[in-house]
Image (spheres, coloured by chain):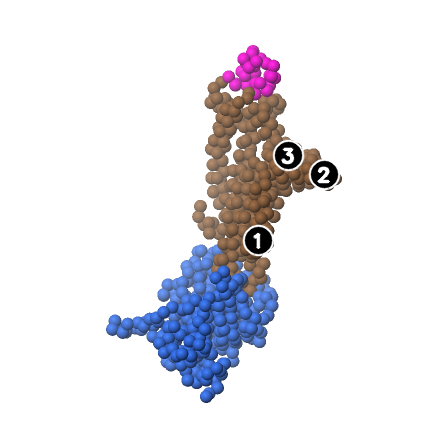
Amino acid sequence: MLQYAARRIALLIPVLIGVSMVSFTIIHLIPGDIVAVLAGPMVASDSEIAQNIRQSLHLDQPLPVQYGLWLMGVLHGDFGNSLTMGLPVGPQIAQHLPVTLALTFMSLTFAVAIGLPSGVIAATTSGRWPDTVIRLFALLGLSTPAFFLGVAAVLLLSLYLPSFKTHATVELHADLFGGLKALLLPAFVLSLAAAATVTRYTRASMLEVLREPYMATARAKGAGRVRVLVRHGLRNALLPVVTAVGVTAAQLIAGAVVVEQVFGLPGVGQLMLNAIYHRDYTQVQATVLVVTTLVVLINIAVDLSYYLLDPRIQRHG
Amino acid sequence: MSLLRVENLRTYFDTRAGVMKAVDGVDLEVREGRTLGIVGESGSGKSVTALSIMRLIEKPGRILPDSHIFFEGNDLAAIPERELESLRGNRISMVFQEPMTSLNPVYTVGDQIIEAIRLHRRVSVQQARDRAVELLRLVGIPSPERRVDAFPHQMSGGMRQRVMIAMALACEPKLLIADEPTTALDVTIQAQILELLRQLRDELSMAVVLITHDLGVVAEMCDDVAVMYAGQVVERGPVESIFSDPQHPYTEALLRSIPLLGMTKAEPLTVIPGMVPSALHWPTGCRFVARCKNALDRCHREPPPLARSGSGYAACWLRESIPEGSQHGAAHR
């Protein structure tokens, strides 16, 4: 298992190189220029000032050379300075990352806490009213975008519950508990679509497991209904659900970008978005790398969890 | 003395096509320490009868309120679910048809046996584990100390069925229901499993209900037999008398359809013509009437009751002892 994990982590390197190339190309392909941002709108793009900026940032070099220079820096642990703020990119990300991590982790927890039980209930009441209600809400949750839900939540809460702070400051390093509390609403908003996905996967998987003969065996042993459902049913139904949770977690990170914007949270998403607006490509590159690493790590965690959940694959691989 | 007495058991399934009367008035009796074979074609209601005795019928199935399942002084059809759970796996156990899928793939066989023990006995995990090893040895699994930690997928079908039996015996039940325990296994393994069941039955002096469609197995294993047809018991009684002197034409036809060693091509196997009627629309009279060669007028009109006949019971108008219109009566004309 350790060997497998090591192999998967080693595979991260080519993935990161590929992703950095793609994001590098895209940020240079879209119209707009960091030089215009830095020099201001009054300076002509072919003036001397503009040329100087271009030269100091190696923007006059061909793209492959630029990419090579950037890559050399990264390999030495230097992600470069933010082009707009002039500060090193690393500490910036280190400051924003905890917020995003906390937000994603909290909404993932919500998604599982809501999705698993409702999926199980829906499966066991299949075709009757609780199932219908849960499926309706799942469909609703899946088809309501987080930005709409977020804005609606902010508006309604500020109108009817003014004492509820929808936009609290989040400083996790200074006030961990207060910060997490402020993240509750955004995390909940972000989690609904994921909860719907988890519900649907759990329901489908559970429906299949309920028909398995070993469920009857467990009943015949004298185990109670709930014990059979959870210990024998859910435990087996979990396998496909874990895959869904992995995919969902990746989507949550993407969704966090939007939700951070709606709630004004200082997370990586906000950092990345600002960098893209300003064509601050060192910043873009670094944030994209961090996010990619996160997604890949989640996938590795999902793969490894199979080993824990399904003894049938333990002996191989 | 009877350990289990089933009276007028009716288990219906509400389906979209209508009410499926899978089990429709079954009467049977299991004597203490004896083996009852339930035989019948597929769809005759054997398995549903077994599941009903354990009350493991899931929706849309239901056991009708006037059904009775008397076991050790309780009517299993009427007691609350909680009490039933304390009996299942404890006083009554069940072994299923499919050993490949009847064990939970994510737990070791040891864990599953330990669960069966600890659901009913207040013992430590270690004690339960020792007992599990002992049970595995009892059912003939080699090196049980090692096998106790194996997962089901690491075992063959025969081994898994042995594990199922070990699990069923965990609390030394008074009654073991085996629902076609050898159907899914190779012929050689079948013989081994049956031999094991017989041996354990004698050692532990428990009663067995053996569901099968193999009359050879019945002849070898059982003391009594109940022949099921179309959701009802059409004949029951001691094995020897039913084999030597069948009272019901269906039993007779079944016995004639067994291939025997030494048969020549000149004596072809008898096949019962026609088909089992649908559980959605049982015929009004005798349910075997369409396939019976000697059917009378009355057979089409009136369902025959299960009445004393020979040394057992049979439900057939062709037996003279049953007067017209009598119910369950052994009354003579």
For chain B, what colour was chosen?
blue
Q: How many marks?
A: 3
Measure how far apart labels 3 and 2 are at the Cα level.
17 Å
What is the secondary structure assignment of the residue under circle 2? Answer: helix
Estimate the x, y position of residue B64 in percent, counting from the top left: 54, 69
Q: Which residue is mark 1?
A: A131
Kindly identify which chain the residue marked by label 2 belongs to: A
From the viewer's perspective, tell me whether residue B39 is left or right of residue A121: left
Measure how far apart labels 3 and 1 are at the Cα level.
33 Å
Kindly identify which chain the residue marked by label 3 belongs to: A
Q: Residues within 10 Å of mark 3 (few under 14, many from 20)?
A: some
> Quarter-wise, where is residue B290 in the image?
bottom left
Q: Which residue is mark 3?
A: A262
Up-down: is A237 above or below B189? above
Seen as rendered, the residue at the extreme right is: A163
Estimate the x, y position of residue B303 in percent, counting from the top left: 46, 76
Residue under disc 3 on the same chain as residue under disc 1: yes
Q: Residues within 10 Å of mark 1 (few under 14, many from 20)?
A: many
The magenta-colored residue range is A34-60
Seen as rendered, the residue at the extreme top is: A48
Report the front residue among B108 and A184.
A184
Kindly identify which chain the residue marked by label 1 belongs to: A
